[in-house]
Image (cartoon, rainbow, N blue to C red):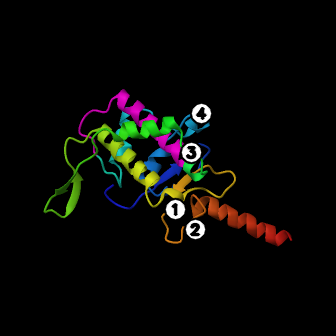
Amino acid sequence: MRTNATGRVLHDPKGGSFRFDAGAVCLDFAYTGGEGRYAVFETLHEPTDLVEWLAQPPLDAVVTAPVTADDLVAAKTLRQAIWEAARARAARRPLSAEAVAAVNRAAASPPLVPELTGNGTAIGWAAPVLASQALSTMAREMIKLLSGPLAERFRECASETCPLVFVDSSRPGARRWCSMERCGNRHKVRALRARRTT
């Protein structure tokens, strides 16, 4: 990844939005939609939606070749595998063979290739920039997370009603909430009301 700044604004289909930093670009990607009950959060409806997501910071991968329906299917397959692997790791369960295979399959493609641009002080991606390269780069990031020093730092939000998973890269490793502005504040309000009624 090109920068440590991660996170995106998530939108609730019932209204409202909040900034959620999952701690890694690959995990941010896992929250672009989903299957089953998470289909209401889908943001990758067309190949152009994938193009737009990849072009945003911090990945900044401006795809230089057409993105196909097959690329979109591959992206959603990787996304689901990342989601399943992250939830399993947060719950301290073994990862499914299917999720591992999907991440490995995406990682097997060549990744994005960084290059210096301008006067040698900025970084870009060497052309051509393909969707498959961006997916490979995110799959490789997930592999590093699952096998590296942050492997035990996958956490599910402490709210009983929030399924969001993140990697806690804070120094003390004490992050509890998907977002203080969302679940953290709701918890504070509930705790304050409980103290006032006792």
Residue 82 within the segment the image draws in magenta: yes
Distance from disc 3 to disc 2, alpha carbons, whole Å, reads 23 Å
Distance from disc 3 to disc 4, alpha carbons, whole Å, reads 22 Å
The residue that disc 3 covers is 94
The type of residue carrying mark 4 is Gly
Left or right placement of residue 76 versus residue 140 in this view: right
Residue numbers of the magenta segment: 62-86
Asked if the residue under mark 1 is in contact with the one under mark 3, i.e. CB atoms within 8 Å, the reply is no
Q: Quadrant of the N terminus?
A: bottom left
Asked if the residue under mark 1 is in contact with the one under mark 2, i.e. CB atoms within 8 Å, the reply is yes
Distance from disc 3 to disc 1, alpha carbons, whole Å, reads 19 Å
The type of residue carrying mark 2 is Ala
Q: Earlier in the sequence, mark 3 or mark 2?
A: 3
Instruction: Say which residue appears at 53% left-offset and 43% top-offset.
Output: 95
Q: Residues within 10 Å of mark 1 (few under 14, many from 20)?
A: many
Q: Earlier in the sequence, mark 3 or mark 4?
A: 4
Q: Residues within 10 Å of mark 4 (few under 14, many from 20)?
A: few
Which is more foreground, mark 3 or mark 2? 3
The residue that disc 4 covers is 36
Residue extending farthest to the right is: 198
Q: Residue 56 at what x, y percent from top left?
A: 35, 50
**Front-lying residue, 77 or 90:** 90
Q: Earlier in the sequence, mark 2 or mark 1?
A: 1
Q: Residue 168 at what x, y percent from top left?
A: 51, 62
Instruction: Say which residue appears at 53% left-offset and 58% top-offset.
Output: 152
Identify whether 42 is placed above or below 164: above
For residue 174, which numbered disc appears in the image?
2
Q: Earlier in the sequence, mark 3 or mark 1?
A: 3
Which is more foreground, mark 3 or mark 4? 3
